[in-house]
Image (cartoon, rainbow, N blue to C red):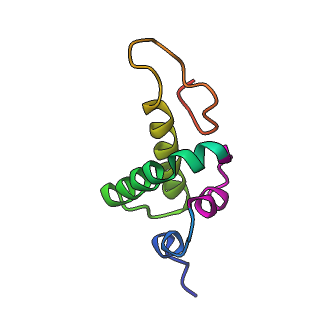
């Protein structure tokens, strides 16, 4: 019996919410609706840069994408913390 390929599983998702649910990452649906395209692009870019070989590396790529998009919206002129980021490890 072969184990399922994580990339095939990711490719089978029809929405970013499915990926977030699969990787057990909580999210704000309003944030997703507003920033869907940026999040999908960032997640896809992370998958291209480093192919995930298991569930944990796929989850890390999605968490990093979610956090990166969230942090990109913060004011650059202040030392504002990443507030409300449900996946941020940088608190």
Residue depicted at x 64% and y 37%? 86
Q: How many marks?
A: 0
Residue depicted at x 44% and y 54%? 43
Q: Which residue in the rendered view is the most extreme toward the top?
A: 78
Span of residues in magenta: 16-29
Locate residue 55, reporting x and y percent: 55, 61
Instruction: Give yes or no for residue 26 being in the magenta stretch.
Output: yes
Image quarter in which the C terminus is found: top right
Locate residue 2, reporting x and y percent: 54, 84
Q: Nearer the viewer, residue 48 or 3?
A: 48
Instruction: Give yes or no for residue 23 being in the magenta stretch.
Output: yes
Q: Is residue 46 left or right of residue 31?
A: left
Image quarter in which the N terminus is found: bottom right
Locate residue 54, reporting x and y percent: 51, 63
Taking the image as drawn, is residue 27 in sight? no
Q: Which residue in the rendered view is the most extreme toward the left?
A: 49
User: Measured along the vertical axis of the image, is residue 53 above or below residue 91?
Assistant: below
């Amino acid at each position: 019996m072969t184990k399922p390929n994580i990339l095939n599983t990711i490719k089978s998702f029809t929405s970013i919410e499915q990926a977030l649910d699969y990787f057990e990452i909580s999210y704000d649906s309003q944030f997703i609706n507003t920033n869907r395209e940026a999040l999908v692009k960032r997640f896809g870019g992370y998958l291209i840069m480093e192919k995930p070989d298991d569930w944990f590396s796929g989850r890390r790529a999605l968490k990093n994408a979610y956090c990166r998009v969230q942090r990109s919206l913060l004011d650059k002129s202040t030392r504002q913390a990443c507030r409300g980021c449900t996946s941020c490890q940088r608190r």
